Image (spheres, coloured by chain):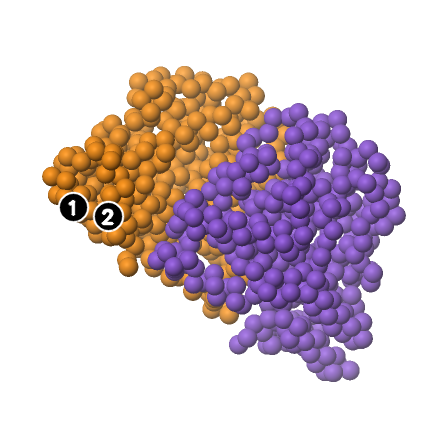
Chain colours: A purple, B orange
Amino acid sequence: MKKHNFYAGPAILPREVMRQASKACINFADMGLSILEISHRSPQFAAVLEEAEALTRELLDINDDYAVLFLTGGASSQFYMAAMNLLAADGTACYVDTGAWSTKAIKEAKHFGNIEVLASSKDKNYNNIPKRYKVPADATYLHLTSNNTIFGTQHHWWPDTEVPFVCDMSSDIFSRPIDVSRFGMIYAGAQKNLGPAGATLVIIRKDLLGKVEREIPTMLDYKTHIAKGSAFNTPPAFPIYVSMLTMRWIKSKGGVAEMAKKNKSKAGLLYREIDSNPLFVGTAAKKDRSLMNVTFLLTKPELEKEFLEMCAAEGCVGVKGHRSVGGFRASIYNAMPRKSVKVLTEVMQALAAKHA
Amino acid sequence: MKKHNFYAGPAILPREVMRQASKACINFADMGLSILEISHRSPQFAAVLEEAEALTRELLDINDDYAVLFLTGGASSQFYMAAMNLLAADGTACYVDTGAWSTKAIKEAKHFGNIEVLASSKDKNYNNIPKRYKVPADATYLHLTSNNTIFGTQHHWWPDTEVPFVCDMSSDIFSRPIDVSRFGMIYAGAQKNLGPAGATLVIIRKDLLGKVEREIPTMLDYKTHIAKGSAFNTPPAFPIYVSMLTMRWIKSKGGVAEMAKKNKSKAGLLYREIDSNPLFVGTAAKKDRSLMNVTFLLTKPELEKEFLEMCAAEGCVGVKGHRSVGGFRASIYNAMPRKSVKVLTEVMQALAAKHA
């Protein structure tokens, strides 16, 4: 049976990317060897790293003021590395708390300097993105989480400030165009729109580095990885390769502007169903709704088991919501076909018809 | 043409492991989904993590005093994490310097406490493992690098001390039985005997943890990963899966004792050729020769190009030596068939015959 993969992450990747990845496990670049067993110093893998960086720059329109790195450790490692590298012990960084990931970012940054939480939507169980706050002009950076996988909210605007943003874009990078010049640093675990778990993308304005006094272990210093082109140590070769394949796919489909158009259309389809179907209700404030993770509840919670069984019968997997919100979550990243979203809305309609 | 993969790392893995990995990229565990796109919280991936830990314990005979973790960041991250977690600011850790990796481990540990380098073979370009040194009884740990990929040396004995060893086994783990009870901690980047780049195995005696005062970011604290069974954050799912497949293969072939027997036989074949062929000479002291990385030079260096061309013509790849030693290096990890080593020795014989 055809599966419709609504997992929040690791998440759906394009079918053709998975086919290419599968082939490379046997014979990569006509070497007669698997990509799993070749030196990261081989010209063939060096070409992968180079293309991954070039595609990142091309797709997001990133200039040479910025370094593009492929690291490990996920966004969870960037929570502390960002502050460790950018925030002086007597400096202040500002954070906006939009959910579980922001909360963790705040916690880890506190090891390194003063952290000021400018706003939080915690009192509303993070159902919105706080809007009314003022960013102190002398802050080192303003940390934002662009998309909140758990709570189904997303930044559709950026604060008006000269302070550079440090932004966790794990779950919506490459889903839409962004003006990189507004950002001091962007980081993203690969395992949503980019690739499989195991690679972490970091985009950082080089002039922000080298300004803190603390000792930083070599592996945790962004300057190390910039100097060595993400190959100071053995990089996570296969996750980077698959990420590169995904970027090739994005480019072949028209780039991030085209992704944004399709993502809007897919999310529109699902939100319209939620808003018109008497059995469902969305959890996020309408103007902050995520185009990546659509969170919704049943108006008759007793139908949950039945709905999930109907989803499973149609091949829709990964629809159960996160325990912090309950209900359901449909993650509809770049690689999710509109057809699959349609299947889910049809299940929702069938449930409503049954209980009309 | 059949390739014989002598790369030092990422390195050869069993053919059947690569075939299984390739299949899992399309359809994993009959889910109708790729392993690259499923949740790390799915029961199917949870089973992979569980089996990976269980196989590590079974193959190396590890009891419950030890935690078994699958992390990211490679051995390069363990260089600082080991000291950060184990070494108090006023404590002393002892290191033996056996090459490039030991040197890096020493450098990174110095951020966290007193580091005493008990012995070094640097004056002989690391062609041997230092033997005559005394370990102070009050040292927190003694750090060793069990196998030196670059210099072709390996520990075939362990120092006589009560001080627990912290050991970088990146390049010979699972190649032979070890008495884990001698070790406080063992760490290994996966990309030699275990799997593809991107996963890092850490085996640690739990009672050694929680004894330092410093603040440790959550992701860098071994206790975090122990508490969450290596799934505090999204683990590098595919590299862990392939590592698990490799461990299944090791088990099916008779375990690490059988690996050791085969490794001795393969290395013996190659060292005998080096010792009997007038054109070649080994670089490592005989009693410290590595069974994993065989380093050797030409007695007539002017034949280097010709030799490498002859290797390439027979499908032998990755034979060029590291710049720190020059000459050649044949890495013959667990998955390297004896047949492939034979092919290399035949090329060496052909070169000698040509220039007799």
Which disc is residue B310 wearing? 2
Q: For the point 20% across and 46% down, which residue is it?
A: B347
* Label 2 crowd bin: few (<14), some (14–19), many (20+), radius 10 Å: some
Q: Is residue B135 above or below residue A131?
A: above
Q: Which corner quadrant of the image does residue B187 belong to?
A: top left
Chain at tag 1: B
Left or right, residue A196 beside residue A292: left
Mark 2–mark 1 Cα distance, whole angstroms, equals 9 Å
Give the tally of numbered discs: 2
Left or right, residue B36 beside residue B262: right
Which residue is labeled 1 in the image?
B350
Q: Position of residue A77 (x, y in %)?
A: 61, 42
Question: Considering the image in quadrants, where does the C terminus of chain A appear?
Answer: bottom right
Left or right, residue B192 beside residue A204: left
Chain at tag 2: B
Q: Earlier in the sequence, mark 2 or mark 1?
A: 2
Which disc is residue A52 wearing? none
In this view of the protein, can residue B194 be seen by the observer? Answer: no
Q: Secondary structure at mark 1?
A: helix
Q: Position of residue B123 (x, y in %)?
A: 34, 19
Mark 1 residue type: Ala
Q: Position of residue B271 (x, y in %)?
A: 20, 37
Seen from the viewer's position, the closer of residues B243 and B209 is B243
Q: For the point 25% across and 52% down, which residue is it?
A: B313
Do dots 2 and 1 share one subunit? yes
Q: For the point 42% across and 19% down, which residue is it?
A: B117
Q: Position of residue B301 (x, y in %)?
A: 25, 34
